[in-house]
Amino acid sequence: AKQQGKDGYVVFKSAMHSQAVALLQLENDLRRALDRQEFRLHYQPIVQLQTQKIIGFEALTRWQHPERGLVPPSDFIPLAEDTGMIVPLGQWLLQEACSQMLHWQQQFPHETPLSICVNISSRQFAQNDFVADIRQTLTDFPIARSSLKLEITEGVIMEQEETVAEKLKQLKAMGVRLSIDDFGTGYSSLSYLQTFPVDTLKVDRSFVMKMGHPDSREIVKTIVMLAHNLKLDVVAEGIETQAQGKLLKEMNCEYGQGYYYSRPVEHHAATNLLAKSQSD
Ligand code: C2E
Ligand code: CA
Ligand code: CA
Ligand code: CA
């Protein structure tokens, strides 16, 4: 039995070893991926629930790995954060997203210009030159004022409370808008909603998914009311069924996104969705 245990240990150790090697390999690949142009942005429409018209997109990063195929962001974003790669990657995707939005705004002029939402991770936001980078991007790709929206989680605000106020003030002055991503899953304190210039709450997908249950339905209803009382927009994430969309409309939730309307798609497909949305 002892022998077996020992073997078991050896097997375990070698499995850990190969896992570590794989992670190291992925990290190396990640470092090269930017130069090799392996990252792509996909765009998921955000719709006005009442009309189902597209009012903007969320940009979501995809990594087309030469051997592994499509690597999901849940596998490489945390790694990019740990290694610092998120900074150059974040700069790239912000430029890519704004460049694409500039095309769309020229091709599809709206009274209220289409908006583009970009996810910002904690380490990226913490950079000293984060605001300067955004300013430069908006100079290089002069999209309509107020059409860039940054999505951050409550965690980013709470962890960096001292520096966050000044950054958000500067961003606000540039016309950049701010969304709280995954709202309802993070910190219990809501006081930051008064202190910081937040524009939008994004109701986390986990609540929308479970809206069949009265408890989740009440939570969603409460978030929508809270947002409206504070004069914030509210976007429901992860709408997969017509029934969920209908419930949200009844709760006066104005905007939504989810597979029911469209999965995240590459830019050609997104352009087609826009053309269709405009002609409907
Ligand atoms: P997130 O910001 O909450 O993005 C929404 C995620 O939900 C996306 O997953 C999207 O594809 C997925 N989704 C949208 N609608 C539905 C639906 O109806 N049903 C279901 N089951 N899922 C839906 P994705 O693209 O895999 O991204 C996962 C997370 O990775 C994102 O969560 C975000 O935190 C992070 N991420 C993605 N792109 C970037 C990026 O460019 N920068 C940073 N910092 N993070 C990113
Ligand atoms: Ca997001
Ligand atoms: Ca989210
Ligand atoms: Ca999320």
Image: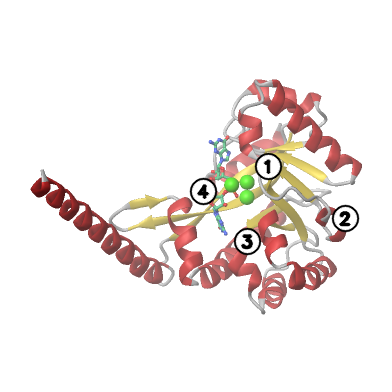
Q: Nearer the viewer, mark 2 or mark 1?
A: 2
Given the image, on which type of amino acid does mark 1 rest? Ile
Query: In what element is the residue under mark 1?
Result: strand
Query: In 3D space, how far apart are the residues under numbered discs 3 and 1 (Cα atoms)?
Result: 18 Å
Dot 3 or dot 4, earlier in sequence: 3
Counting residues from the start of the chain, the first of labels 2 and 4 encountered is 2
- Residue type beneath disc 2: Gln
Name the residue at 71% across, 44% down: 202
Of badges 3 and 4, the one in the foreground is 3
Q: In the rendered structure, which amino acid carries the disc numbered 4?
A: Glu
Question: What residue lies at 26% left-to-right and 57% top-to-bottom?
Answer: 16
Judge left or right: residue 38 versus residue 220. Answer: left
**Position above or below: 267 against 97:** above
Which residue is tagged 2?
A: 194
SS at circle 3: loop
On screen, residue 32 versus residue 229, left or right, reads left
Q: Give the CA distance from mark 2 to mark 3.
A: 21 Å
Q: Label 2: state its secondary structure.
A: helix
Identify the residue position indicated by label 1 in the image: 46
Where does the C terminus fall, quadrant-wise? top right
Camera-side mark, 4 or 1: 1
Q: Quadrant of the N terminus?
A: top left
* Residue 51 appears in the picture as rendered: no
Spot occupied by residue 26 in the image (x, y as percentages of width and height): 34, 63
Res 120 label: 3
- Frontmost residue, 169 versus 60: 169
Ligand 1 within 8 angstroms of badge 3 C-beta: yes
Above or below: residue 110 compared with residue 280: below
The disc, 3 or 1, on the residue closer to the chain's N-terminal end is 1
Query: How far across and down, in percent of the image, does residue 213 sit?
Result: 66, 21
